Image: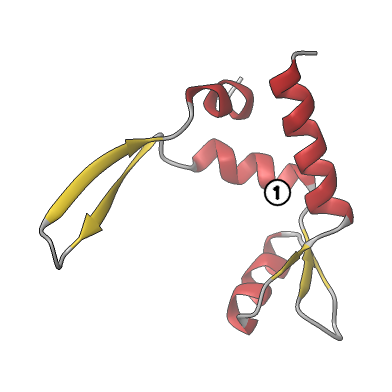
């Protein structure tokens, strides 16, 4: 297993075990319906690796970052290494 794959595997473990804080109740509801475990007494959401992998598989490989005040548009690619892990 490469170092990048080890980092990815550890990040999945952290998201599943430690969870993330999600303040928006609507977002917590969407995550729960998608399969995440949501702490009923707080804002903590635990993301199973399967859900993270599914989301990574459907994420675009590029996105546009807009700064409307300065009229700047810049295309930003996602990390090629991350794509290689997320999309075998």
Q: In this view, does 44 lie above or below 9?
A: below
Please tell me how many numbered marks the rendered image carries: 1
Q: Quarter of the image holding residue 42?
A: bottom right
As rendered, which of 22 and 58 lies closer to the eye?
Answer: 22
In the rendered image, residue 15, in percent from the top left (x then y), is placed at: 78, 52
Residue 24 falls in image quadrant: bottom right
The crowding category of the residue bearing disc 1, from other C-alpha atoms within 10 Å (few below 14, some 14 to 19, many at least 20), is some
Residue assigned mark 1: 51
- Residue 81: image location, x then y, percent: 55, 22
Side of 32 relative to 54 (left or right):
right
Q: In this view, does 73 lie to the left or right of 57?
A: left
Q: In which quarter of the image is residue 54?
A: top right
Please, which colouring scheme is shown? secondary structure
Decide which of 46, 76 is in the foreground and name it: 76
Which residue, as the protein is rendered here, is positioned at the far left? 71
Task: Answer above or below: position of 61 versus 36.
Answer: above
Q: Which residue is drawn at 17% across and 49% down?
A: 73
Residue 66, image x, y percentages: 23, 56
**Residue found 69% across the figure and 22% down from its top:** 4
Q: In this view, does 26 lie above or below 75?
A: below
Which residue ends up furthest to the bottom in the rendered image?
41
Name the element at disc 1: helix
- Residue, x 83% and y 52% (percent of image)? 16
* Side (left or right) of 76 relative to 7: left
């Amino acid at each position: 297993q490469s170092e990048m794959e080890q980092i990815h595997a550890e990040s999945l473990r952290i998201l599943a075990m430690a969870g993330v804080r999600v303040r928006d109740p609507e977002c917590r509801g969407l995550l729960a319906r998608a399969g995440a475990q949501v702490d009923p007494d707080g804002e903590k959401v635990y993301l199973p690796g399967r859900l993270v992998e599914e989301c990574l598989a459907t994420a675009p490989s590029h996105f546009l970052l807009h700064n409307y005040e300065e009229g700047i548009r810049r295309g930003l690619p996602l990390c090629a290494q991350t794509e290689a892990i997320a999309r075998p």
